[in-house]
Image (cartoon, rainbow, N blue to C red):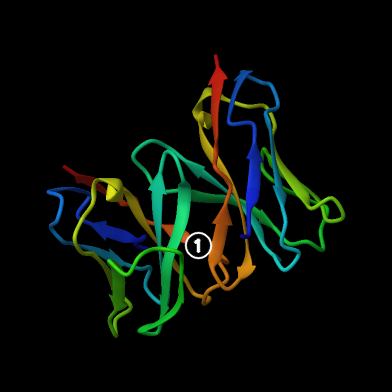
Amino acid sequence: QQQVKQSPQSLIVQKGGIPIINCAYENTAFDYFPWYQQFPGKGPALLIAIRPDVSEKKEGRFTISFNKSAKQFSLHIMDSQPGDSATYFCAAGGGADGLTFGKGTHLIIQP
Amino acid sequence: KAGVTQTPRYLIKTRGQQVTLSCSPISGHRSVSWYQQTPGQGLQFLFEYFSETQRNKGNFPGRFSGRQFSNSRSEMNVSTLELGDSALYLCASSSDSGRGYGYTFGSGTRLTVV
Protein backbone atom coordinates (compact mmCIF):
# COMPACT_ATOMS: atom_id res chain seq x y z
CA GLN A 1 0.00 0.00 0.00
CA GLN A 2 1.27 3.43 -0.88
CA GLN A 3 2.23 5.33 2.25
CA VAL A 4 3.48 8.69 3.32
CA LYS A 5 5.03 8.74 6.78
CA GLN A 6 5.02 12.04 8.64
CA SER A 7 6.85 13.10 11.80
CA PRO A 8 6.66 14.38 14.43
CA GLN A 9 3.07 13.84 15.46
CA SER A 10 3.12 17.02 17.52
CA LEU A 11 5.53 19.91 17.89
CA ILE A 12 5.82 22.91 20.20
CA VAL A 13 8.05 25.80 19.15
CA GLN A 14 8.64 29.25 20.59
CA LYS A 15 7.61 32.26 18.53
CA GLY A 16 10.32 33.12 16.03
CA GLY A 17 11.66 29.56 15.96
CA ILE A 18 11.79 27.30 12.89
CA PRO A 19 9.55 24.25 13.15
CA ILE A 20 10.54 21.43 10.81
CA ILE A 21 8.14 18.68 9.76
CA ASN A 22 9.40 15.65 7.88
CA CYS A 23 7.80 13.21 5.48
CA ALA A 24 8.97 10.09 3.68
CA TYR A 25 7.31 8.31 0.80
CA GLU A 26 7.69 4.93 -0.84
CA ASN A 27 6.24 5.11 -4.33
CA THR A 28 8.66 6.62 -6.82
CA ALA A 29 5.74 7.25 -9.20
CA PHE A 30 4.67 10.21 -7.05
CA ASP A 31 5.47 13.47 -8.83
CA TYR A 32 3.75 16.10 -6.72
CA PHE A 33 4.35 16.86 -3.05
CA PRO A 34 2.08 19.44 -1.42
CA TRP A 35 1.75 20.62 2.15
CA TYR A 36 -1.63 21.50 3.61
CA GLN A 37 -2.50 23.58 6.67
CA GLN A 38 -5.69 22.87 8.58
CA PHE A 39 -7.30 24.95 11.31
CA PRO A 40 -10.02 23.53 13.58
CA GLY A 41 -13.38 23.43 11.85
CA LYS A 42 -11.89 24.08 8.43
CA GLY A 43 -10.79 21.99 5.50
CA PRO A 44 -7.10 21.65 4.61
CA ALA A 45 -5.70 24.60 2.66
CA LEU A 46 -2.87 24.23 0.18
CA LEU A 47 0.25 25.92 1.54
CA ILE A 48 3.03 25.10 -0.87
CA ALA A 49 3.89 22.27 -3.26
CA ILE A 50 6.99 20.95 -5.00
CA ARG A 51 7.85 18.71 -7.94
CA PRO A 52 10.68 16.13 -7.70
CA ASP A 53 12.90 17.96 -10.19
CA VAL A 54 13.43 20.78 -7.66
CA SER A 55 15.35 20.45 -4.37
CA GLU A 56 13.89 23.47 -2.61
CA LYS A 57 10.99 25.85 -2.94
CA LYS A 58 10.19 28.96 -0.91
CA GLU A 59 6.93 30.84 -0.61
CA GLY A 60 6.99 33.59 1.96
CA ARG A 61 7.97 32.08 5.30
CA PHE A 62 7.37 28.50 4.12
CA THR A 63 10.09 26.35 2.54
CA ILE A 64 9.96 22.80 1.22
CA SER A 65 13.20 20.84 1.03
CA PHE A 66 13.11 17.77 -1.20
CA ASN A 67 15.56 14.85 -1.32
CA LYS A 68 14.63 12.61 -4.23
CA SER A 69 17.27 9.94 -3.59
CA ALA A 70 16.18 9.55 0.04
CA LYS A 71 12.49 9.87 -0.88
CA GLN A 72 12.03 12.47 1.82
CA PHE A 73 10.76 16.02 1.98
CA SER A 74 10.27 18.52 4.75
CA LEU A 75 8.52 21.77 5.59
CA HIS A 76 10.30 24.62 7.36
CA ILE A 77 8.41 27.61 8.75
CA MET A 78 10.64 30.66 9.19
CA ASP A 79 9.97 33.24 11.90
CA SER A 80 7.02 31.21 13.19
CA GLN A 81 4.07 33.06 14.69
CA PRO A 82 1.26 31.98 17.04
CA GLY A 83 -1.11 32.25 14.05
CA ASP A 84 0.81 29.39 12.43
CA SER A 85 -0.52 27.04 15.12
CA ALA A 86 -2.45 24.44 13.15
CA THR A 87 -2.27 20.87 11.89
CA TYR A 88 0.03 20.36 8.92
CA PHE A 89 -0.29 17.52 6.43
CA CYS A 90 2.19 16.43 3.83
CA ALA A 91 0.91 14.54 0.83
CA ALA A 92 2.07 12.88 -2.36
CA GLY A 93 0.23 12.83 -5.65
CA GLY A 94 0.49 12.03 -9.32
CA GLY A 95 -0.85 8.52 -9.05
CA ALA A 96 -4.34 7.28 -9.79
CA ASP A 97 -5.72 7.74 -6.29
CA GLY A 98 -5.51 11.48 -5.85
CA LEU A 99 -3.39 12.47 -2.88
CA THR A 100 -1.93 10.15 -0.26
CA PHE A 101 -1.66 12.05 3.00
CA GLY A 102 0.60 11.78 6.01
CA LYS A 103 -1.08 11.47 9.41
CA GLY A 104 -0.51 15.12 10.27
CA THR A 105 1.55 17.21 12.69
CA HIS A 106 -0.15 19.28 15.37
CA LEU A 107 1.99 22.42 15.64
CA ILE A 108 1.78 24.89 18.51
CA ILE A 109 3.72 28.15 18.39
CA GLN A 110 4.05 29.59 21.88
CA PRO A 111 4.09 33.41 22.25
CA LYS B 1 -14.12 33.56 -6.78
CA ALA B 2 -16.32 31.28 -4.70
CA GLY B 3 -14.62 28.36 -2.99
CA VAL B 4 -15.75 24.79 -2.56
CA THR B 5 -19.12 24.60 -0.82
CA GLN B 6 -20.15 21.58 1.20
CA THR B 7 -23.58 21.11 2.70
CA PRO B 8 -24.70 20.47 5.29
CA ARG B 9 -21.92 21.42 7.72
CA TYR B 10 -23.14 19.10 10.44
CA LEU B 11 -25.25 15.96 10.50
CA ILE B 12 -26.36 13.61 13.21
CA LYS B 13 -27.73 10.28 12.04
CA THR B 14 -28.77 7.04 13.65
CA ARG B 15 -27.02 3.77 12.95
CA GLY B 16 -28.65 2.01 10.00
CA GLN B 17 -29.86 5.19 8.31
CA GLN B 18 -28.46 6.59 5.11
CA VAL B 19 -27.07 10.05 4.40
CA THR B 20 -26.35 12.22 1.37
CA LEU B 21 -23.68 14.92 1.37
CA SER B 22 -23.30 17.61 -1.27
CA CYS B 23 -20.31 19.38 -2.77
CA SER B 24 -20.25 22.31 -5.20
CA PRO B 25 -16.78 22.74 -6.71
CA ILE B 26 -15.05 25.90 -7.80
CA SER B 27 -16.54 27.20 -11.02
CA GLY B 28 -14.76 25.61 -13.98
CA HIS B 29 -13.37 22.69 -12.02
CA ARG B 30 -14.53 19.36 -13.37
CA SER B 31 -12.88 17.05 -10.83
CA VAL B 32 -14.35 16.40 -7.41
CA SER B 33 -12.68 14.06 -4.96
CA TRP B 34 -14.02 12.93 -1.62
CA TYR B 35 -11.99 12.16 1.49
CA GLN B 36 -12.85 10.85 4.93
CA GLN B 37 -10.95 12.39 7.83
CA THR B 38 -10.80 10.71 11.23
CA PRO B 39 -8.39 11.17 14.16
CA GLY B 40 -7.16 7.60 13.86
CA GLN B 41 -6.85 7.11 10.11
CA GLY B 42 -6.25 10.67 8.96
CA LEU B 43 -7.34 11.64 5.46
CA GLN B 44 -8.36 8.70 3.32
CA PHE B 45 -9.38 8.82 -0.34
CA LEU B 46 -12.94 7.74 -1.07
CA PHE B 47 -13.42 8.39 -4.77
CA GLU B 48 -12.97 10.89 -7.56
CA TYR B 49 -15.39 12.06 -10.21
CA PHE B 50 -14.44 13.81 -13.40
CA SER B 51 -16.97 14.92 -15.99
CA GLU B 52 -19.73 12.83 -14.38
CA THR B 53 -17.63 9.63 -14.40
CA GLN B 54 -16.10 7.92 -11.40
CA ARG B 55 -12.42 7.73 -12.26
CA ASN B 56 -10.96 6.18 -9.11
CA LYS B 57 -12.17 4.60 -5.90
CA GLY B 58 -10.44 4.09 -2.59
CA ASN B 59 -10.61 1.11 -0.29
CA PHE B 60 -14.05 1.66 1.20
CA PRO B 61 -17.06 -0.67 1.25
CA GLY B 62 -19.84 -0.44 -1.31
CA ARG B 63 -22.01 1.40 1.22
CA PHE B 64 -20.10 4.49 0.14
CA SER B 65 -21.14 5.76 -3.26
CA GLY B 66 -21.26 9.00 -5.16
CA ARG B 67 -22.23 10.73 -8.33
CA GLN B 68 -21.50 13.89 -10.23
CA PHE B 69 -23.92 16.03 -12.16
CA SER B 70 -23.46 17.86 -15.44
CA ASN B 71 -22.75 21.12 -13.56
CA SER B 72 -19.89 19.31 -11.72
CA ARG B 73 -21.69 19.32 -8.38
CA SER B 74 -21.20 16.04 -6.59
CA GLU B 75 -23.01 14.06 -3.96
CA MET B 76 -21.82 11.18 -1.85
CA ASN B 77 -24.13 8.72 -0.18
CA VAL B 78 -23.49 6.41 2.73
CA SER B 79 -26.06 3.70 3.32
CA THR B 80 -26.63 1.56 6.40
CA LEU B 81 -24.61 3.88 8.60
CA GLU B 82 -22.26 2.42 11.19
CA LEU B 83 -20.81 4.11 14.26
CA GLY B 84 -17.39 3.99 12.60
CA ASP B 85 -18.64 6.19 9.77
CA SER B 86 -18.53 9.18 12.11
CA ALA B 87 -15.99 11.49 10.50
CA LEU B 88 -15.36 14.75 8.71
CA TYR B 89 -16.12 14.25 5.04
CA LEU B 90 -14.18 16.57 2.78
CA CYS B 91 -14.49 17.22 -0.89
CA ALA B 92 -11.77 18.74 -3.02
CA SER B 93 -12.14 20.27 -6.43
CA SER B 94 -9.51 20.49 -9.10
CA SER B 95 -9.20 21.27 -12.77
CA ASP B 96 -7.09 18.13 -13.27
CA SER B 97 -8.31 14.57 -13.05
CA GLY B 98 -7.11 12.10 -10.50
CA ARG B 99 -3.62 13.24 -9.75
CA GLY B 100 -4.20 15.50 -6.77
CA TYR B 101 -2.77 18.62 -8.36
CA GLY B 102 -3.99 21.89 -6.93
CA TYR B 103 -6.76 20.53 -4.75
CA THR B 104 -8.99 23.09 -3.07
CA PHE B 105 -10.88 21.60 -0.15
CA GLY B 106 -14.22 22.60 1.26
CA SER B 107 -14.79 23.00 5.00
CA GLY B 108 -16.32 19.55 5.19
CA THR B 109 -19.43 17.91 6.57
CA ARG B 110 -19.13 16.64 10.12
CA LEU B 111 -21.14 13.41 10.32
CA THR B 112 -21.94 11.90 13.69
CA VAL B 113 -23.56 8.47 13.82
CA VAL B 114 -25.28 7.59 17.08
A106 left or right of B68 in image: right
Tag 1 residue? B103
Residue at (37% x, 44% y) in the render: A42
Looking at this view, is B63 or B110 the one in front? B63
Q: Is residue B86 above or below residue B60?
A: above
Looking at this view, is A105 or B80 the one in front? B80
Where in the figure is residue A89, as x and y percent of width and height? Answer: 56, 44
Residue A62's quadrant in the figure? Answer: top right
Quadrant position of the C terminus of chain A in the picture: top right
Where in the figure is residue A100, as x and y percent of width and height? Answer: 57, 57
B78 left or right of A14 in image: left
What chain does badge 1 belong to?
B
Where in the figure is residue B72, as x and y percent of width and height? Answer: 33, 78
A96 left or right of B4 in image: right
Residue at (35% x, 68% y) in the render: B25
Quadrant position of the N terminus of chain A in the picture: bottom right
Residue at (69% x, 65% y) in the render: A30
Where in the figure is residue A7, as x and y percent of width and height? Answer: 65, 35
Evaluate whether residue A17 shows in this view. yes
